[in-house]
Amino acid sequence: MNALHICDMTFWIGSSQRPVHGAQFRNSNEVRVAEDGGCTTLTVDPNAPDPQTLLDTTPFQSEIQAANLAAERLVRVLVSLALLLFLAVALLSKWRSGHARDGLAIPSIYHELPRIYLLFALVLGSLFAVVTPPGGVPDEPAHLAKIILVENGQWVGGHEGAVLDPPLSNLLGPFDGFLNPSTQFETAEVLEHASAPLQCRPAKEDFTGSAASYSPTMYTVGAVLLNLSCRADASVGTFFYAARLLNLLLSVTLTFFALRAAGPLSWPIAMFALLPMSLFEQASLTADSMTLGLGFLVTGLHAGLASGHLQRTRRLELAIFVASLALALAKPGAAWLCAGFLLTWPAYRPHARRFAAMCFILILVPWILHATWVLWSSQYGIPRVGIDVGANVNALTEQPSRIAMLVWNTFTGDEGEFLYMSVVGRLGWLDVVMPHWAYSMGYLVLGASLLMKGDAVRDLPMFTKPVALLLGLGAVLIPVAPMYLYWTTQSAEAVQGLQGRYFIPMLAFVACWVAWRAASVRFAVALFSFLVLLVINVTAIYHLVARYYG
């Protein structure tokens, strides 16, 4: 639009609200502000790549500071209570170990963890899949368009005005306004759309092509199910929710086998996999569902082999190879996790030549496949409107210090808070924000997972942790590259478009390898972690329902 007319705008501070006046909007290079009677008109330069205006919150600063202080006090109290609970359970578990032999033994925690995870993930993930309206996951309409294209035989590419069968509008129906935070729906509206028939006939439509360059392997489940749904004259809801639940089942099953494989190093993987953000994405039609499952699986197989929980066999090497190839055709950058095979050196110590050959097969081959695919498919990548990819590429060589500062600001500046929150859970179209205490407790669980290294069959060499940190740093930086090239304006002060969910497999990888053994608190960590994860996931579902259904 060229102009936006605002006649009634409210600024929420905690549970109170204050009216916003036109004079509080600031002129910018791309937006002009003018009073129009009792309203405010924001006029936008039609050529502006990223129109923005600032809202002067000076009149509200005292109230904002008071609300922030109250929130910080609440977080401190809750975290203190959580730490006291943790200490109490730790003391109780130590007393139990000295005075009782029955009950939950420490080794059984790792034995039971995959099954406990499976129960939590399927129940909570199914709730996310069901309560989220069609398209209500970030970029899900773009991934849904990709599923239609793959089913139609166009495995890569896609552009506005393409012919889709069935039309994307048929699958989304009225659920196409999530970028407006005031958009809400009635339960009856969702049920009515779910019962509508699939219109399996071609139609020319515009759609967002941000998933056009992704590998079709990430959309096989959805494409097959769409084909079967059209043949069976099924309803929209039959396809939509069945595809989400099948994606969830497949991704969770891959994670389940990752936990079984990782054995004594499995706990951090499980904690990252049970975050609301992970379960929300696994229960979606996006490429993140398979990327998360495959990322956890490759890390789990490497960890189990390195620790001695899995015996080195040709069958295991074949399983790692297949999983690595699948990961190589996941989202760009995901194949970096294949480098974790370097840390399995203890399993190959007497067989150095075999290890070198396996490094070529299990690291370089997936990397070559991944790089070839990404470079070839990048011709189908669609940059953000107004982004000059060539100028961004030139800046890498002409202004390397500026780009380094851009990356630094991304993780340490104002953008950093959003990244850290969206690791734990920024749901909906990233506008469903949980209370501050939920994020604090979530990171407390992730931090506690670093104490949960089990009694490994084989102790890992001293170089494992520093190498894992270096590989993890590389894995974290890799998703920054495409977002810088295709999403960041020349005037930006940080890399734009990054989300914390991109880093979940990489962070789980690092936590898995750097964890250490603290046997005396394992029972306390286990009980505390599952209680917290249950609470924050239920909180996330509650806020998701409140966002979409009022």
Image (spheres, rainbow, N blue to C red):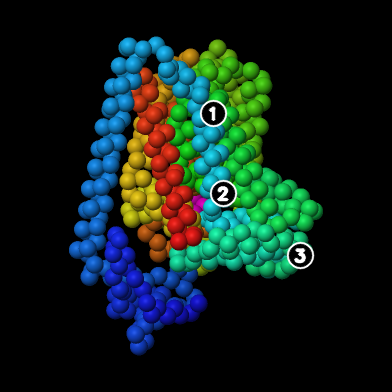
Which residue bears the numbered disc 2? 129
For the point 37% across and 54% down, which residue is it? 415
Q: Which amino acid does label 1 sit on?
A: Arg
Image quarter where the C terminus lies is: bottom left
For the point 37% across and 28% down, which residue is it? 525
Which residue bears the numbered disc 1? 115
Residue 97: percent from left, percent from top:
35, 14
Say if residue 142 shows up in the picture. Answer: no
**Which residue is most to the front?**
188
Magenta segment main secondary structure: helix
Which residue bears the numbered disc 3? 202
User: What is the C-alpha distance between the residues marked 1 and 2?
Assistant: 21 Å
Residue 308: percent from left, percent from top:
52, 17
Q: Are the two marked residues, 1 and 2, in contact with CB atoms closer than 8 angstroms?
A: no
User: What is the C-alpha distance between the residues marked 2 and 3?
Assistant: 27 Å
Q: What stretch is highlighted in magenta?
A: 480-484
Sequence order check: which comes first, mark 1 or mark 2? 1
Q: Are the two marked residues, 2 and 3, in contact with CB atoms closer than 8 angstroms?
A: no
Q: Nearer the viewer, mark 3 or mark 1?
A: 1
For this rendering, which residue is in front, 32 or 280? 280
Residue 101: percent from left, percent from top:
39, 11
Residue 128: percent from left, percent from top:
53, 48
